Amino acid sequence: MNRTDYTNLAKGWEFIEDTAYAAEPPALHRLRRQCTDAGFTQGSAAQAGFLAMQARQLKARSVIVLGSGSVVESAHLLEALESNDPDVSGQLTTVDSSAQGTSLIRRVFSGVQDGVRTKLRVVNAKPSVYFPRLNAGDYDLIVINGENVNYESALDHAHRLLRVGGELVMCDVLAVDVEGSRGGLLDPADHGDKATHMRQLIDETLQDERFVSCIVPIGTGMLLSIKQ
């Protein structure tokens, strides 16, 4: 493709994001503002919608969301879990290593449990400490976002926790949605921790024969991996 093609794709990416945001109900727009005011800027609307679509396609029952204050994504995923098999109670687990992020998620979803079938679990812990406690093969979808530490050993944790056919989704693989980013993978001169890690992680993931993986241009880049 030439420069014009790439420019048009960038415009198309912007159109897709604007369309996805416009499709979100007013309640989610208010939730975004609430989270931003609390110091937790929420991610792409297209990304959140795509994650919910993946949960529906997988007919997911158990989902883990790892990341700092990923409230809007969790709301989308909760709706998806509620729309799946009405005879089965799903479970949505949000894991945040920051006490502030955990408090925000608990506050936003307080009272929700009474009105839904899906069980909500909010955990304040580092993934390296929490994930080894979970049962192997119990999860359908794992979503990772946020700080660089959240991606450490992601493939090994996901391979143990996911059922066969389950999916690991790593968000912000372009490493642009992080404090101090200098362009992420889009700028070869960015040698920040997350950009450097993502360059290695993408290569490692695409070569890992335990998964079938691909990168998709949604949000700030997503790396999808299905467990073999």
Image: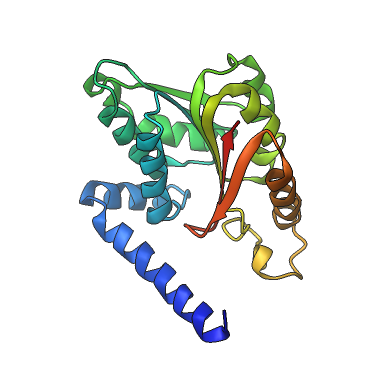
Residue 140: image location, x then y, percent: 48, 27
Q: Quadrant of residue 187?
A: bottom right
Disc tally is 0
Nearest to the observer: residue 63 or residue 4:
4
Residue 181: image location, x then y, percent: 65, 62
Residue at figure coordinates x 25%, y 23% from the top left: 116
Quadrant where the N terminus is found in the figure: bottom right
Nearest to the observer: residue 72 or residue 187:
187
Residue at figure coordinates x 32%, y 17% from the top left: 89
Nearest to the observer: residue 198 or residue 149:
198
Q: Is residue 86 left or right of residue 143?
A: left
Q: Quadrant of residue 92?
A: top left
Residue 23: image location, x then y, percent: 25, 56
Q: Is residue 126 visible?
A: no
Residue 87: image location, x then y, percent: 25, 15
Above or below: residue 112 compared with residue 171: above
Above or below: residue 6 compared with residue 43: below
Above or below: residue 222 compared with residue 7: above
Quadrant where the C terminus is found in the figure: top right
